[in-house]
Image (tube, rainbow, N blue to C red):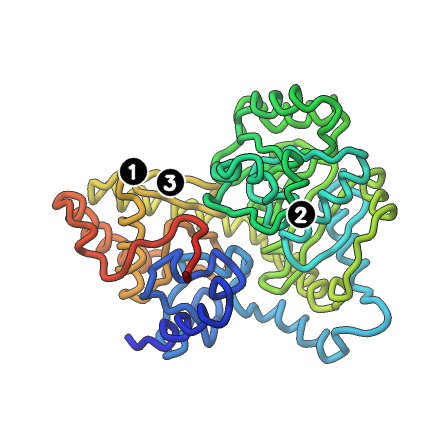
């Protein structure tokens, strides 16, 4: 296997701080020194790297953005037509209004929508609007909500505040010290942590933002209790559906739990890989946006709106969520079955449409690195997380598990022999945010 991508990644780290624009795509998060890093072509669930090597993607599928698959003909066709008619002008794209209506129609509690291009900035927009609507500064949060100051400021109070949300080791350098204590973490399925925040910050919590579901389902009426607390203290409740939205159903996953927020945020899958994000909400909350300044030239660009409309249409026409759930359940069962056949202990998590697993051993990170290494040699981009895509077929999934079975057999030997580190051809993958250069 040639290594053009590996060499380019080393060069990138000297030209781009951190090597690229997204932590989740850093090669060190998968196989430091051995990951192909760059793609030349992507179609369906297949990727070709700079040297023409072919892979099936059972890793991230565009960091969960390409719900229909790479280069979907219907979405790409709509985008090409939009480009032919002009992607930007001094007038507005009419598709913006169509998309707002479609999202409101999918959520009977919502009345209005605003748009951005990424999930992180959409969360920042939602928090700004919610603060404006509530008239209070402090934010209680649960989950991962992006890179902006309002979120990272939580680590000004304690450098570990964000560790239990998704990513550890996030540094708040460059975030104003004046924001210390304005964003306060609570923990999923632990309503007492939210109650404690409310008790310690009387009449100051104006926003509660959380992921309605990521790895595990809500327990003991958790979401309903959060809703009750928000109502009682007069806080705006935001559900961050950037990762969960449109995967298990048409709309937000909160609809399955029958809990209505005041606002919800969407991104990733909304445009099947084209940049588009949305904030929807009730009229009384969203109208507060008119009292603060939220504006950007590229939020009016046409392609994102067109891609989102085409994605939603195909998802409805083909009942995509049902297919994603079927595939995800098949993958979850496959992991469990293959692990049991090889006497390996793993823990399978996530909603069916976004499954994940980890090895129930102290050497989990080393075992994950070995899995990535061995699957790569077999022609798979693979990790412990596998957001499903409409581009998967039964045959593709079955062949994937034929290869997983071979790798699990090797992992069992490593566990028994205690020599996993000796079997690694590359350094152990990163689990956290780290500097890549000195």
Task: Examine the image and state in which quarter residue 88 appears.
Answer: bottom right
* Residue depicted at x 44% and y 61%: 26
Query: Taking 311 as reference, is 163 left or right?
Result: left
Disc 3 and disc 1: Cα gap in Å? 10 Å
> In the shown orientation, is residue 371 left or right of residue 224?
left
> In front here: 341 or 288?
288
Q: Is disc 3 surrounded by few (<14), some (14 to 19) or many (20+) residues within 10 Å? A: many
Classed neighbour count for the residue bearing mark 1: other residues with Cα under 10 Å, few (<14), some (14–19), many (≥20): few
> Which label was assigned to residue 348?
3
Of marks 3 and 1, the one in the foreground: 1
Q: Position of residue 304 (x, y in %)?
A: 69, 64
Alpha-carbon span between mark 2 and mark 1: 33 Å
Q: Residue 67: where, in percent of width, then height?
A: 54, 57
In the image, what residue occupies the spot 67% across and 53% down?
121
N-term mark: 2 or 3: 2
State the image quarter where residue 57 is shown: bottom left
Q: Mark 2 points at which residue?
A: 123
Secondary structure under tag 2 reads helix
At x 41% / y 70%, what residue is drawn? 9
For the residue pair 293 and 403, the one nearer the viewer reads as 293
Q: How crowded is mark 2: few (under 14 residues within 10 Å), some or many (20 or more)?
A: many
User: Which residue, given by chain and number where applicable, does mark 1 sit on?
Assistant: 360
59 on left or right of 366: right
Relative to 349, say whether 247 is above or below: below
Relative vertical location of residue 364 with respect to residue 206 in this rendering, above or below: below
2 vs 1, front mark: 2
Placement of the N terminus among the 4 image quadrants: bottom left
The disc placed on residue 97 is none
């Amino acid at each position: 296997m040639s290594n053009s991508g590996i060499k380019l990644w080393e060069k990138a780290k000297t030209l781009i701080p951190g090597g690229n624009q997204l932590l989740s795509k850093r090669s060190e998060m998968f196989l430091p020194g051995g990951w192909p890093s760059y793609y030349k072509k992507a179609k369906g669930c297949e990727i070709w790297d700079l040297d023409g090597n072919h892979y099936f993607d059972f890793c991230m599928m565009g960091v969960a953005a390409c719900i229909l698959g790479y280069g979907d003909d219907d979405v790409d066709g709509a985008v090409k037509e939009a480009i032919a008619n002009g992607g930007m002008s001094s007038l507005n794209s009419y598709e913006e209004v169509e998309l707002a209506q479609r999202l409101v129609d999918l959520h009977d509690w919502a009345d209005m929508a605003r748009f951005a291009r990424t999930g992180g900035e959409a969360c920042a927009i939602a928090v700004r609007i919610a603060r404006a609507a509530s008239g209070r500064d402090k934010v209680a949060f649960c989950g991962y909500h992006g890179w902006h100051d309002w979120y990272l400021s939580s680590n000004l109070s304690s450098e570990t505040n964000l560790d239990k949300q998704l990513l550890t080791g996030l540094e708040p350098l460059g975030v104003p010290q004046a924001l210390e204590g304005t964003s306060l973490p609570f923990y999923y399925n632990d309503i007492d942590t939210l109650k404690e925040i409310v008790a310690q910050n009387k009449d100051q919590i104006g926003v509660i933002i959380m992921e309605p579901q990521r790895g595990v389902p809500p327990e003991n009426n958790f979401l309903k209790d959060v809703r009750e607390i928000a109502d009682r203290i007069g806080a705006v409740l935001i559900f961050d559906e950037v990762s969960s939205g449109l995967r298990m159903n048409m709309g937000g996953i909160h609809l399955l739990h029958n809990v209505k927020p005041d606002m919800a945020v969407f991104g990733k899958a909304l445009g099947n890989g084209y940049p588009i994000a949305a904030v929807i909400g009730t009229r009384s909350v969203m109208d507060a946006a008119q009292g603060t300044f939220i504006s950007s030239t590229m939020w009016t660009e046409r392609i994102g709106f067109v891609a989102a409309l085409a994605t939603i249409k195909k998802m409805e026409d083909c009942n995509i969520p049902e297919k994603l759930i079927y595939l995800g359940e098949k993958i979850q069962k496959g992991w469990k079955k293959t692990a049991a056949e090889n006497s390996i202990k793993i823990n399978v998590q996530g909603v069916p449409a976004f499954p994940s697993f980890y090895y129930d051993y102290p050497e989990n990170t080393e075992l994950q690195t070995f899995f990535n290494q061995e699957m790569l040699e077999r022609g798979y981009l693979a990790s412990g997380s596998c957001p499903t895509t409409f581009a998967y077929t039964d045959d593709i999934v079955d062949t994937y598990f034929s290869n997983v079975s071979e790798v699990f057999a090797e992992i069992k030997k490593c566990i028994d022999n205690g020599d996993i580190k000796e079997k690694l051809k590359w350094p152990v993958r990163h689990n956290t945010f780290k500097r890549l250069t000195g």
